[in-house]
Image: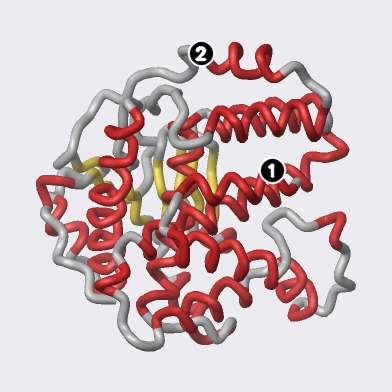
Amino acid sequence: MRLNPFNPGSIQVGRGGGGGFPGGGGGQLGCGAIVIALIGALVFGIDPGQMLGSLQGSGVQQQAGPGSTYGTGESAAEICDDNAYATEACNALASLNETWQPLFTQAGVQFQQPTLWFYPGNTSSGCGNASSDAGPFYCPADQGIYIDTSFYDTMAQQMGAEGDFARYYVMAHEYGHHVQTLTGISAAIRQAQQQRPQQANQLQVLMELQADCYAGVWAGRNRKLIEPGDFEEGMTAASAIGDDTLMRNAGRQVNPESFTHGSSQQRMQALRLGLESGDDTQCDRIVEAG
């Protein structure tokens, strides 16, 4: 995928993952309100008005803007030029910001950029301590995307998921969780999980699949930059990190009730839906189907 080089003054990056800064507020984008209502009404029988009302004014305001760096005092260019994977991730971050910000503006919803944190081995975040063994993750508490770039070697060597588009898919998926945080979908699902813990995994799968779909939306809206083989790389990556595939590869019995991200087939379908439609509202169908 031929992404343009990032502008160091337009992104927020850090090294070491120090917990960042306070996260941003709520709102709905596209059919976000419908999604939240359906989660409450269809899955749990909760009054949608009560759930929507609980999201009004949620969150705190982000305190830094584009061009900010954190952790070591290095410039964004220095952090992003650390290795080829880091440069790719920064290019993807800039492209994701450029793709999603207009959609929020059109919807009349305040947009907040996430911060991309690069860390080796272990890190602390607004969501607690984490090891790179867990893979890339998004923390809604500090609106940070956390990546140990060595994970990309693991993807290629142990999962057979290689190629730049496979790596961009990972970034775009984590960014999808940022979109869910800004729209209030993440908060609604967390609330529902607390109220019905026996269905927590089911709801988590819906949220992960929607993030896959949002990753596809980003790619679909940048279709002119897609190169031959990119689609196949994305599908291979989505399949490789499906819960059923990971369980089989680990020698475990496949148990759908313990899924937290979705099966390989579900993840490929979600990514394809977003990519082919380029429409974020189509991703709401995933939650509606649940």
Amino acid type of disc 2? Gln
- Separation of residues labelled 2 and 1 (CA atoms): 22 Å
The picture places residue 57, in percent across and down from the top left corner, at 46, 13
The picture places residue 98, in percent across and down from the top left corner, at 23, 49
Of the numbered discs in the image, which one, if any, rests on residue 203? none
Instruction: Assess disc 1: are there few (<14), some (14-19) or many (≥20) residues with their C-alpha within 10 Å of its C-alpha.
Output: some
Label 2: element kind: loop
The residue at which mark 2 appears reads as: 56
Placement of 169 over or under 25, stated as above or below: below
Q: Earlier in the sequence, mark 2 or mark 1?
A: 2
Amino acid type of disc 1? Glu
Residue at 26 percent of width and 24 percent of height: 63
User: Where the N terminus falls, by quadrant?
Assistant: bottom left
The residue at which mark 1 appears reads as: 288
Marks 1 and 2: in contact by CB < 8 Å? no
Residue at 14 percent of width and 65 percent of height: 5
